[in-house]
Each structure stands twice: as C-alpha cells, then as structure tokens.
Amino acid sequence: MAIFALAACSSRPSGLPSPIGTDAPVLVPGSPGGPGRTATPGERVGQTPKPATASDVRFAEAMIPHHRQALEMTSLVDERTTTPSIRAFARSITAAQTPEIKAMTGWLAELGRQAPAGHEHGQAAGYGMASEEELNALRAARGTAFDRLFLQLMTKHHQGAVKMAGEELANGRDQRMRMLAKDVYSGQSIEIARMKQVLDSLPA
C-alpha cells in the first residue's frame, strides 16, 4: 500500500513500518476509488518485518567467524608487503567487514543468542575458510610470495562468503540479514574479480 508524505521527512529503510507522530502528517490511501485518511499518531504503516528464521540465525552465526578470519588475514598485510594493491584490498575488507560483524553480533543479541567465539570454523566450514596450515604459511610469507598467497586464500574465502550470502538470500526472511547478505554478495563478488586480475599480474 503506497504512503504519501505531505512534507519531507527523515528517510527510513524500505519495508520497515513507519511510526507516525514525530514527522509531517502521512496520508494513507483507502480502497480503490475510496477516500484516504490521515494516519493517527503512533500508528505504524507499511509492511511488517518478517520474523527471523533458522536460516537467518545460521547465516549470522557462520558469517561472524568467517569475517573474523578475513580480518586476521588482513592484519598481516602491513608488516609483510608494500604492494599498494594488496594493502588497498586489506583496508577495504577491514572497513566493510568490521561493522558487519558488529551488526550481526547485535542482531543475535536481540534474539538472546551469543555470537560465536573467535573464528572457529563451526557452520562456516566448507565456505572457503583457510586451514591453520594455510594461515601459518601466510604468516611466514613475505613480499611477492605473501601477495600471491594472500590473494589466493582471500579469493577462496570471498567465494565462500558469496555462497553463504546466496543461501541467505534464497532462504532467509529477516530484512536486516538479507540486506547484509546482498552487500556481501555484491561487494565480495566485485573484489573477487579484482583480486584475480591482480593475481594474474604478479611476477612468476
């Protein structure tokens, strides 16, 4: 049902109910051909958010440790390479995934669930997570060897995140988790393509 604001008001995420009473009057259209009416103070109009499902919870509980491992890998960059493109990837990944972890942790807390500790594989296993042996190899590498291994591991890691996000978009119902999944799917798909280009350009 369309909602027409009579004056400009602050923007809200699409699909969320609009609380009435603090902004300009809101006209709620009636049935086709019928008169409209003014919403009463405190009334919520628009779509009611769909309740969270087990798929939404699994997505958050798996993506948090998945993101944490990505941040562990990006934390190694500055001391192991001076390559501008690798450092730029690390900054971008850190900037995107740090607030996403916070958002998912807060969302789980609202449901009375605690976020997974550390970056234990758990439900994230099978989604491109690096093994401890691969992480140790990354920690030991320097220069071009580090660049190559970082890009290989992070590309696989991103591919796992894109797969996980796709599953959330197919099965999840919570609006916030679906929006986050869309961001992960689009943002990390772009980074995968860019990382592959840089990997192909590295000296043999």
Image (cartoon, rainbow, N blue to C red):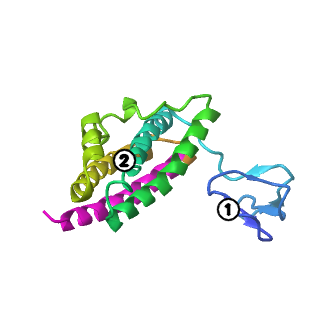
- Tell me, for residue 31, which label it has, or none: none
Report which quarter residue 123 is drawn in: top left
Prevalent SS, magenta region? helix
On screen, 174 above or below 54? below
Residue beneath label 1, please?
A: 2
73 displayed left or right of 150: right
- Mark 2–mark 1 Cα distance, whole angstroms, equals 46 Å
On screen, 31 above or below 53? below
Task: Kindly identify the amino acid type of the residue bearing the numbered disc 2.
Answer: Met
Question: Residue 150, percent across and down?
Answer: 28, 52
How many numbered marks, from 0 up? 2
Residue beneath label 2, please?
A: 73
Q: Are marks 2 and 1 in contact (CB under 8 Å)?
A: no
Q: Which one is in front, 149 or 45?
A: 149
Helix, strand, or loop for circle 2? helix
7 displayed left or right of 81: right
Q: Residue 195 lies in magenta, yes or no?
A: yes
Residue at figure coordinates x 36%, y 50% from the top left: 162
- Is there any visible trace of residue 35 in the rendered image? no
Q: Which residues are magenta?
A: 177-204
* Label 1 Cα neighbours within 10 Å, binned few <14 / some 14-19 / many ≥20: few
On screen, 199 above or below 71? below
Dot 2 or dot 1, earlier in sequence: 1
Quadrant of the rendering where the N terminus is positioned: bottom right
Q: Which one is in front, 98 or 142?
A: 142
